[in-house]
Amino acid sequence: MEDLGKNLTEQMQRNNWNERYQKLITEILQDTEVRTFLAENSQTLTQADVMKSASKLYEFVTLKKQIAQGKQTFAPGYLPTLAISNHRIEVVYVPTAELKARREQKALEARVKTINLPRSVRKAQLKDYERSDERMEALKAALDFVNSYSKKPKEFHKGLYLEGSFGVGKTYLLAAIANDLAKRGYQTTLVHFPSFAVEIKSSISKNQTTEYIDSLKKAQVLMIDDIGADSLSSWLRDDVLGVILQYRMQEELPTFFSSNLSLTQLEQQYLTVNNRGEAEPLKAKRIMERIKFLADEYHVVGKNRRNPE
């Protein structure tokens, strides 16, 4: 195989090229990657091709040195590599492993839309969820959902209704499910319902109510966190929550809930009596039927991780 690097050096000496240019080319040809590239492509490139591409080879070697010295380059996060295009050597920039990892992390985070929830939930992982005997039923149901949904995402899969005391990890478990689904390419919307209720009331004056409702009812996977923690108006129950759940029931879209109330308590203490003190049991029952269609109830126990004593 022809040694282009050696031949070029000899040609420079014969032609008596100017000292600065000779030094530049010599420096380039001392680079191991350049010599390897030229050797591997000796059947494709002529000496003339290489000399025409000297500026590209210089760019390649210079950038490599800058990166090795920790200097800022014009393409941060990218590494130069050599390629051939129409008998010309080109410098192609490829993302580093670190840049690829950052991009992947951003893509994962983009698949989990959180509304009025702390950023800390973005780090929740099913593998880190406490595996005590009392919590295994809910965890197993979560793992089963992720596996079955991933295999057949177009089929209907019931979500989980997680109920338990304050701070026992209900929101964490929902977020962990969402993050696991994100790794598999699925999008989840995780919303803190009391905060959402405040926002949607204020959206009326901005004429954005339909947009707010649609963002939840059409979510690929929806998780309603802390339902039952606020007072509920008839409008919010029937025209917001009811509309969202009705659509998701009809379209058989995965829906999850977390609450400090059991399903029975949710119906009797939250859905039946509105914020004016009026009892509307039939309307409450309609909402409950939708919730029960969409999710199975699981009791979550444990110590309060927000305010440990």
Image (spheres, grey):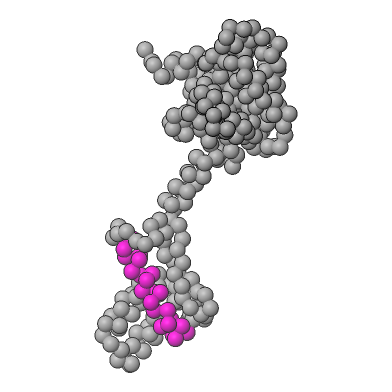
x, y (%) of residue 288?
A: 67, 16
Task: Tell which residue pokes out farthest to the left in this image.
Answer: 19
In this picture, is 187 found above or below 78?
Answer: above
Q: Residue at x 37, y 62 (%)?
A: 74
Across and down, in percent, residue 83 comes to 48, 71
Residue occupying image coordinates x 51% and y 80%: 87
Query: What is the quadrant of residue 276 in the picture?
Result: top right
261 with respect to 168 (left or right): right
- Whole-percent x, y for residue 198 in the image: 51, 23
In magenta, the rendered stretch is 46-68
Q: Is residue 111 visible?
A: yes
Image-based side of 86 in relation to 61, left or right:
right
Taking the magenta stretch, the answer to whether it contains residue 172 is no
Q: How many marks?
A: 0
Spot occupied by residue 215 in the image (x, y as percentages of width and height): 60, 34
- Magenta segment: does it hold 53? yes
At 42% from the left and 59% from the top, the residue drawn is 78
Q: Quadrant of residue 53?
A: bottom left
Q: Nearer the viewer, residue 191 or 261?
A: 191
Q: Nearer the viewer, residue 66 or 261?
A: 261
Instruction: Determine whether, in the image, residue 32 is placed left or right of residue 241.
Output: left
Q: Residue at x 73, y 29 (%)?
A: 250
Depicted 239 relative to depicted 15: above or below: above
Classified by dominant secondary structure, the portion drawn in magenta counts as: helix
Q: Is residue 176 left or right of residue 304?
A: right
Of the 4 image quadrants, the one containing the C terminus is: top left
